[in-house]
Image (cartoon, rainbow, N blue to C red):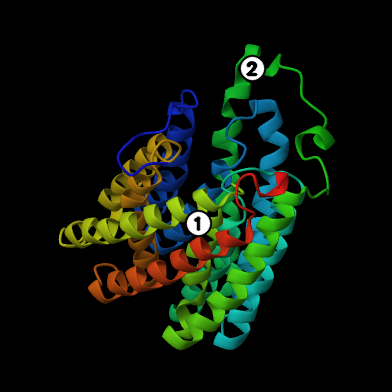
Amino acid sequence: MSLFAFAPSPGPRWHLATQAALGIAAPIAVMTLLGQPSLGYIAASGAFTVLFAGRAAVVDRARILPLVAAGLLLSAALGAALSANAVLVSIGVVVVAIVSAALSFGFRLGPPGPLFFVLVFGLSAHVIASSPIAPLLYLAALAAGCLFSYLVAVSPLLRRRTRAVAARPLKELLPGPTFTPDSRMLLIRVAIVAVLGVLLGLVIDPVRTYWVVGSAVAVIGVAASRRAAVERGLHRMLGTVVGAGVYALLALLHPAGLWLALLLGALQFTIELVVVRHYALALVFITPLVLLLTGAATGEIGSMDVALERIVDTVAGAALGAASGVLHPRPGAKDR
């Protein structure tokens, strides 16, 4: 995964990019027109649902994605329940990271792994603690967003030829729970960086521990190798710094309402096209998307202080995630 070269394309991703873009843009646009844009920003987080099982057949995704949505909602509910206490939120970050990693790796869910469960937990706690939105209303809006994104993802089933594909047994789609030596090591790494990330976050700012841990978990990903850890760490740090600059430029435009919906949809579309080919480039778009979405939900959009905080948190988390890669044996070590 070089900084100066694109990985080979795994196949067409236009359909996934379109689904993800609609999942994030449509709720914001609709709720803005209805006079409730804040609920639209929350519902847009439901677009994370369609980022999973992207290579599976639609008939199979129709059975996997409800489980993903349930996991996201449970993470959000726990974040909402603990939002009033920063220490409990930090403990919750560790619990969600370990549990979601165990389930993701144990049942071979595949990319993006446990990352979004951690981020949804942290974002939910942060938004509810810093805005007047009631927890139940927040969860209802997120559930509506997950449902909408799910319907978008399975909409190809309206075509007869798509429905004609034979569905695979769920046990085959999500085999487990079993752990290989590699998946066991990935889980150990997530547990270690979650604990250390929270401790580091408590020093930096207890409110931001979830971002430090999320950055570390993102670097770990689903690839079990030292080289992948170092490369993803470098990509994440560089991509986030450049992405924060992009956010600063976009924030000067003070996007809101339908314009913000269109901008976020365009960013999400671009992310899904490039994330499998160049991680650092994808982060150039992921960073402003998350900062704009979080800022809109909390009323802090355009804050340069937040952008600088995210750079600090990401560098700390990415360094942790990359350093944890030394736990993997060196290539060929098993043969000695």
- Residue 177 lies left or right of residue 93; in this view the side is right
State whether residue 132 appears in this view: no
Q: Position of residue 43 (x, y in %)?
A: 50, 55
Q: Identify the mark nearer the N-term, 2 or 1.
A: 2
Q: Report the Cα–Cα distance between label 2 and label 1.
A: 35 Å
Q: Amino acid at mark 2?
A: Thr
Check disc 1: other Cα within 10 Å, few if <14, some if 14-19, many if 20+.
many
Q: Secondary structure at mark 2?
A: helix
Residue nearest the viewer, comparing 278 with 169? 278
Check disc 2: other Cα within 10 Å, few if <14, some if 14-19, many if 20+.
some
Residue nearest the viewer, comparing 55 with 240? 240
Q: Position of residue 121 (x, y in %)?
A: 58, 67
Q: Position of residue 120 (x, y in %)?
A: 55, 63
Residue at 29 percent across and 68 percent down: it is 301
Mark 2 or mark 1: which is in front? 1
Q: Position of residue 16 (x, y in %)?
A: 49, 33
Q: Amino acid at mark 1?
A: Val
Q: Is residue 15 above or below residue 181?
A: above
Query: Mark number for residue 109?
Result: none
Residue at 39 percent across and 46 percent down: it is 25
Provide the residue designation for mark 1: 219
Residue at 46 percent across and 37 percent down: it is 276
Q: Secondary structure at mark 1?
A: helix
State whether residue 118 appears in this view: yes
- Residue 12 lies left or right of residue 151; in this view the side is left
Quarter of the figure that contains the N terminus: top left
Provide the residue designation for mark 2: 162
- Name the outermost residue toward the front: 336
